[in-house]
Amino acid sequence: MHGLSTFEPKNGFVKWLEARLPILSFAHGSFVAYPTPKNLNYWWTFGAILSFMLIAQIITGVVLTMHYTPEATLAFSSVEKIMRDVNWGWLFRYAHANGASMFFLAVYIHMFRGLYYGSYKNPREVLWILGVIIFLLMMATGFMGYVLVWGQMSFWGATVITNLFSAIPIFGNEITTWLWGGYSVDNPTLNRFFALHYLLPFVIFAVVGLHVWALHVTGQNNPDGVEIKDVEKDCVPFTPHATMKDGLGVVVFLLLYCWFIFYVPNYLGDADNYIPANPLKTPPHIVPEWYFLPFYAILRAIPDKLAGVIAMFAAIAVLAFLPWLDKSPVRSAKYRPMYKALFWAFVVVSIGLGYCGAMPAAEPYVTVSRVLSLLYFGFFAILPFLPRWEKTLPVPATIAEAVLAKSGKVEPPKPEPVKAAPAKAPTKSTRLWK
């Protein structure tokens, strides 16, 4: 589905480069001439927003690394030094910390959009699975980055989460000791988390490259879930049409991002993280960052430690099996009334789990978390049987038909080719005249 590049080199150097490394024609075919469905809405701009946020996180993270000290007795003070003594250090630190939240906000919207419009269905299974892998890598990177602050909530959050691996039968304690680099969260833990936090964003960048590659092979999904039939009628070039729309989406999202950086930089954090880590004093209520809260609520909802860990990881892993769980031939929820209702119920359940995860592990939040956890997994359990009961709405035959129907127009019928009349045999008088 990648666009056939019409790029022609204009000068000698570019011709020389193209003959040896045709990177400019590749970029032109992928990001200029690439055919984009006409009916894409602004929910599709979150792919560009996520690309922007990934680059912003890598740049700010590299700058912070130049001033950070990954040593248990100096880590907290080095962060404070960045805030107070490094030129523009406060800006880079707040941009990076709030950038993680903005990154997860964008990826959750991106994933819910994929769920609503069926972007995980054939032939985009690998595209979806790569997205789930990116999500897992983001969670690992975000968790390790949170630990690097070495405040009270960072330290005890690391202690609680890494200690979950001890629930694994037989090898659990060995895995936990290996993660810690000792028998508790200490300097070796901070060092390896720092190394991995620096490495994983580049791994994410590589997997994002595969994700975009898979997207360009299968082509983009669209709000109507209809495959491209005629490139000229159903599509527009990526540039300037999608580029302008993505640019506007990035600018609007950037306004929200900047509002958090400059006006409420600590709103999404925890006040306890401004207290240096103290292994002898446990905070009364340990809470991870907001983007982990739904899965943290599922973990706490189950009284058995091992079962809670399995349920927490299963809540993420089950996303990778969506292409095979949802057996409906119709992609978009626009034409699936029952699925649309289930989808919005799933969104409410996910938000409810996030709220319960932020609350203390006491009643009524524990009971509510258990109910919502059942509903969360119930969404995936009911999907294979939904096509038996669901009556779908008529789906447009083409993207062009869907666009015209939305604008109140009707696609004009294709004129039938005029058939030439069969030649008549010459009459006797005609032969005589000739």
Image: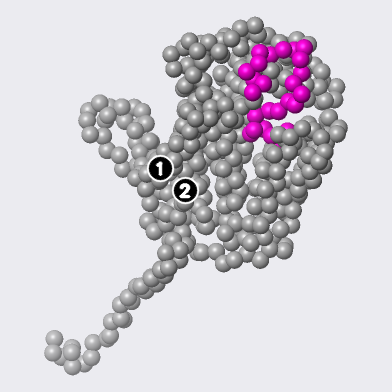
- Image-based side of 100 in relation to 420, left or right: right
SS at mark 2 in the image: helix
Residue 15 location, quadrant: top left
Q: How is the image coloured?
A: one colour
Residue 97: % across, % down: 55, 25
- The crowd level at tag 2 (other Cα within 10 Å; few <14, some 14-19, many 20+) is few
| Residue under pointer 1 | 248
Residue 275: % across, % down: 66, 16
Residue 341 location, quadrant: bottom right
**In the rendered structure, which disc, 1 or 2, sits on the residue that comes first in sequence?**
2
Residue 393 location, quadrant: bottom right
- The residue sitting at 49% across, 40% down in the picture is 47
Dots 1, 2 in contact, CB < 8 A: yes
- The residue closer to the viewer here, 185 or 166, is 185
| Residue under pointer 2 | 42
Amino acid carrying mark 2 in the image? Tyr
SS at mark 1 in the image: helix
Residue 144: % across, % down: 63, 21
Relative to 11, residue 247 above or below = below
- Image-based side of 301 in relation to 404, left or right: right
Amino acid carrying mark 1 in the image? Leu
- The residue sitting at 66% across, 66% down in the picture is 391
The magenta region covers: 271-296
- The residue closer to the viewer here, 313 or 282, is 282
- The crowd level at tag 1 (other Cα within 10 Å; few <14, some 14-19, many 20+) is some
Magenta region includes residue 345: no
Relative to 73, residue 322 above or below = below
